[in-house]
Image: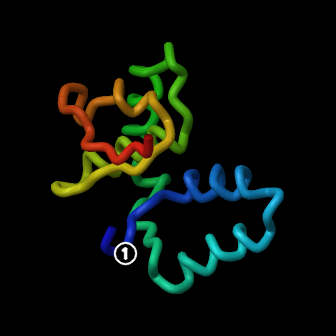
Amino acid sequence: MEGPLLTVEPVLTEASFLLRRNPGAQDDLVRMVADGVLRIPFRLEAEAEALRLLRAKYRDLPMSLADACLVRLAEMLDQHRVFTLDSDFTIYRKHGRTPIPLIIPD
């Protein structure tokens, strides 16, 4: 994959939690942001209402804040693919109707 890769802060929080037993990996994650490998072009404050509506739509799953932010970011971008380990992304839709292009490891 070519960089920079785009993400949202709640995803970094979840990733950091998953890496909690490997502080070096947590540091590497932060370093990737500092080095511009990962970029965060998303402001939660500006997208709060859209996120609320997404979470309401998918409340039966339920949709996490990180998932909602990624779906919203996908709605904001013309060309994108979401890298995820979360099978819920096969259900989520951009603008309520368009499947999100995914990269899901086997």
* Residue 96 horizontal/vertical position (percent): 24, 27
The residue closer to the viewer here, 89 or 103, is: 103
| Numbered label tally | 1
Q: Is residue 75 left or right of residue 86?
A: left
Which image quadrant: the C terminus?
top left
* Residue 76 horizontal/vertical position (percent): 25, 52
The quarter of the displayed image where residue 57 is located:
top left
Residue visible at 65% across and 75% down in the picture: 28
Outermost residue toward the front? Answer: 106
The residue closer to the viewer here, 68 or 47, is: 68
The crowding category of the residue bearing disc 1, from other C-alpha atoms within 10 Å (few below 14, some 14 to 19, many at least 20), is some
The image's colour scheme reads: rainbow
Outermost residue toward the bottom? Answer: 35
Q: Is residue 72 left or right of residue 88?
A: left
Residue visible at 35% across and 24% down in the picture: 91
* Residue 97 horizontal/vertical position (percent): 19, 26
Indicate the amino acid at tag 1. Pro
The quarter of the displayed image where residue 99 is located:
top left
Helix, strand or loop at mark 1: loop
* Residue 11 horizontal/vertical position (percent): 55, 52
Q: Give the residue at mark 1.
A: 4
Residue visible at 83% across and 58% down in the picture: 21
Residue visible at 35% across and 44% down in the picture: 72
Which image quadrant: the N terminus?
bottom left
Q: Is residue 41 left or right of residue 26?
A: left
The residue closer to the viewer here, 19 or 36, is: 19
